[in-house]
Structure formats: structure tokens, C-alpha cells
Image (tube, helix red, strand yellow):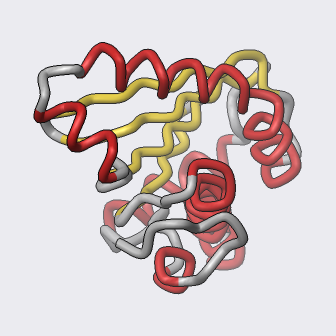
Amino acid sequence: MGEEQDVAGMDLLSRLSTEMVRAQKKYFGRGPSETKSYMLDDFLLIVMRGSQTQAERTMIEFGQENLVREFRQQFENEMTSRLVDMVEDLTGRNVRGYQSQVLFDPEVVIEIFFFEAPADQSEIEATARGQLEDPSVGEAATDAQDEDVPGDIEAG
């Protein structure tokens, strides 16, 4: 397997992370501070940290984790087709199922996409090798975290 395939696999993970940041900023009003994607067989995991809004942090301080979780889940349910379409466009693969999960301690949101079939072996090897050799593989582009996106109502 050549270096070109390695770069393509690593680039795909970064693009997935970057586009997820942009989608979160556009539709949720705030993007995560850190995002990293992982391709594992027929799963794509996108892990986002630092994405709570000030209102969510305040509600969590009041002990209302369930209300924040319920809103996040409802929001993700409504966003399913947009996020699935984005992932299918970037990967060229059909998504069979999607789920989102929010954790409060540590503050993490995990987007899980289940594909109809496993990734090509060369893609799996390229992404695994890239992650072993360079921990930044799969991270969102730095400028995606900083760029203004229409609807971005909170800077930080």
C-alpha cells in the first residue's frame, strides 16, 4: 500500500471532523473546541469535546442534566438526515444507522455512524497507521474551530 492511500485515509478523517465542527456551529450555534474522527470497520465515531453552550452549562449546574440530554437528543434526532447526508457525501458510503450520545463528565459528545459494509481494508490500514504514527490524524482543521459560520452566536 502506498503513501498516497495513507494520506487519503488520514485526510478523510480530518475532513469528517472539520465538517462536523462546521455543522455544529451552523445548526447548534456553537462548535466543539476539539473534534477527532475514528474509522473502525463499519463504524465511524466522531468525538467532540467542549461543545456545551453557556445555557447548557448553567442548567447542568442547576442539576438539570436530563433536560440538557433530552434537548440534545431531540436536536440530533432532527439533524439525522443532514448529518447522515454529510457523512455519505464525504465517504461515498451508505450509512445504515446513526446515533448520538452526550456525556457530561467528561464533557464529550459522540456521533456514531454505522455503514452498510466495512471500509475498504486499505482505508482501515491507512487510518490506523496514521493514528499510531501521528496523534493529530483525524482532528478537525484548526481553522474550523475558529472560523465564523452563519448562526454562530457564541464565540467561546
Name which residue lies at 58% across and 49% down. Answer: 28
Q: How many marks?
A: 0
Q: Is residue 34 left or right of residue 37?
A: left
Q: Is residue 89 left or right of residue 72?
A: right
Q: Is residue 60 left or right of residue 2?
A: left
The vertical placement of 78 against 2, above or below, is above
Along the viewing direction, whichever of 44 and 9 lies nearer the viewer: 44
Along the viewing direction, whichever of 135 and 57 lies nearer the viewer: 57
Say if residue 1 shows up in the picture. Answer: no
Say if residue 134 shows up in the picture. Answer: yes
**Whole-percent x, y for residue 75 in the image:** 60, 28
Along the viewing direction, whichever of 37 and 153 lies nearer the viewer: 153
The answer to which quarter of the image holds residue 36 is bottom left
Name which residue lies at 57% across and 37% down. Answer: 44
The vertical placement of 101 against 3, above or below, is above
The answer to which quarter of the image holds residue 66 is top left
Tell me the quarter of the image containing the N terminus: bottom right
Along the viewing direction, whichever of 128 and 13 lies nearer the viewer: 13
**Whole-percent x, y for residue 78 in the image:** 72, 25
The answer to which quarter of the image holds residue 3 is bottom right
**Whole-percent x, y for residue 25 in the image:** 58, 61
**Whole-percent x, y for residue 18 in the image:** 60, 66
Tell me the quarter of the image containing the C terminus: bottom left
The vertical placement of 151 against 75, above or below, is below
Name which residue lies at 36% across and 28% down. Answer: 102
Q: Is residue 93 left or right of residue 143?
A: right
